[in-house]
């Protein structure tokens, strides 16, 4: 939430209990993946800033992020491609997102349900 002038503080603050999360609460400069949907009371859960190139989520330091993502923000000048079963084995389960965009929940992204199904991400900065 944008901060109000309470006790001399101004700026962005994270939502607290009873407050609905909004994208403005989470400014990003690189594509960012979130564990939970924006509307989930547990949002954001873990977050992951996606580097340029190909990222196999099961190869991260915390491989539990594989098949566990539910939302994403893609800032301007970035293109992110989400794969359900890896780059070489995805078939029709591929969605390209061109920034700036935010996907509140992967239950319907590009007409597909990729909620807790994304295994690989390719990010390109242009």
Image: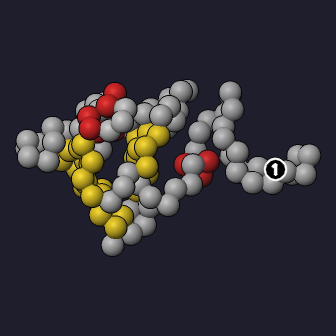
The residue that appears at 27% across and 48% down in the rendered structure is 55
Instruction: Indicate whether 92 appears above or below 42.
Output: below
The residue that appears at 68% across and 28% down in the rendered structure is 18
Q: How is the image coloured?
A: secondary structure
- Find residue 104 and report its horizontal and vertical position in percent: 43, 42
What count of labels does the image hold?
Answer: 1
Residue, disc 1? 4
Instruction: Indicate whether 96 appears above or below 34.
Output: below
Q: Is residue 9 visible?
A: yes
Q: Which residue is outermost to the bottom? A: 126
Question: Is the residue marked by circle 1 packed among few (<14), some (14-19), or many (20+) residues within 10 Å?
Answer: few
Instruction: Indicate whether 1 appears above or below 68.
Output: below
- Find residue 107 and report its horizontal and vertical position in percent: 32, 35
Residue 17 appears left or right of 89: right
Residue 59 appears left or right of 22: left
Assign the C terminus to one quadrant of the image. Answer: bottom left
Q: Helix or strand or loop: what does disc 1 sit on?
A: loop
| Quadrant housing residue 120 | top left
- Find residue 35 and report its horizontal and vertical position in percent: 42, 33
Residue 51 appears left or right of 21: left
The residue that appears at 36% across and 64% down in the rendered structure is 78
The residue that appears at 52% across and 56% down in the rendered structure is 28
Q: Which residue is outermost to the front? A: 61
Q: Is residue 111 visible?
A: no
- Find residue 96 and report its horizontal and vertical position in percent: 25, 55
Q: Quick one: 8 or 39, which is closer to the camera?
A: 8
């Amino acid at each position: 939430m944008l901060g109000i002038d309470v006790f001399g503080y101004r700026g962005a603050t994270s939502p607290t209990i009873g407050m609905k999360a909004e994208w403005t609460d989470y400014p990003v400069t690189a594509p960012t993946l979130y564990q939970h949907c924006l509307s989930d009371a547990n949002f954001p859960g873990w977050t992951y800033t996606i580097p340029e190139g190909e990222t196999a989520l099961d190869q991260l330091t915390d491989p539990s992020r594989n098949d566990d993502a539910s939302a994403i923000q893609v800032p301007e000048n970035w293109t992110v491609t989400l794969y359900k079963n890896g780059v070489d084995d995805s078939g029709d389960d591929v969605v390209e997102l061109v920034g700036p965009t935010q996907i509140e929940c992967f239950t319907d992204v590009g007409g597909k349900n990729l909620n807790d199904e994304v295994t690989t991400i390719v990010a390109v900065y242009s």
